[in-house]
Amino acid sequence: MSVVHVDPIGIDLEVAVGETVMTAARGAGFVWPTVCDASASCGTCVSVVEDGLENCGEMPADERETLARTLVPLDGKRRLACRLTVTGPVSLKKRGVHAVEDGSQ
Ligand code: FES
């Protein structure tokens, strides 16, 4: 289990080995922006790794293809939360993450 801090909402998510950040967020009661429902095709979930880059899992091919197609720089810091796994503490920035109780998707 690793902790992923997400700003600007300021939450800490517990992410299990092999689990994606988006899945962990949903399990904890948060909505992560998506159009494709986590199928790695829309690019909407893209997040910026601010710390802990060395703890981020390898980028799968479908994530790389979507980032390239949506013109997101392949610098390793921009990652799709629906594909991002972690092996240690990571800090991310992603606007639009909110609690389910907020009522909007
Ligand atoms: S949710 Fe669509 S690419 Fe991640």
Image (cartoon, grey):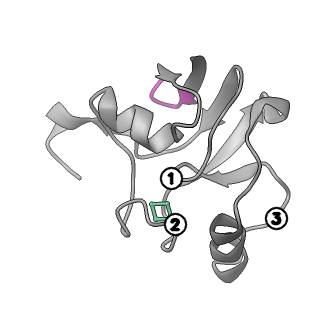
Amino acid type at mark 1: Cys
- Identify the element where label 1 is drawn: loop
- The reply to whether residue 11 is in sight is no
SS for callout 2: loop
CB atoms of marks 2 and 1 within 8 Å? yes
Magenta region: 6-10
Q: CA distance from mark 2 to mark 3?
A: 15 Å
Q: Quadrant of residue 94?
A: top right
Q: Is residue 9 magenta?
A: yes
Q: Earlier in the sequence, mark 3 or mark 1?
A: 3
Classify residue 31 as left or right of residue 84.
left
Q: Is residue 22 magenta?
A: no
How far, Cα to Cα, is label 2 from label 1?
A: 6 Å
Nearer the observer, 5 or 19: 19
**Mark 2 or mark 1: whose residue is earlier in sequence:** 2
Mark 1 = which residue? 82
Judged by its main secondary structure, the magenta piece is loop
Residue 37, given in percent of the width and then of the height, sits at: 34, 62
Asked if ligand 1 lies within 8 A of label 3, the reply is no
Q: Amino acid at mark 3?
A: Leu
- For the residue carrying disc 1, how many other residues have a C-alpha within 10 Å: few (<14), some (14-19), or many (20+)? many
Mark 2, residue position: 40
**Where does the image place residue 2, in percent across and percent down from the top left?**
61, 19
- On the image, numbered disc 3 is attached to which residue? 74
Q: For the point 33% across and 37% down, which residue is it?
A: 26
Q: Quadrant of residue 66?
A: bottom right
Q: Secondary structure at mark 3?
A: loop
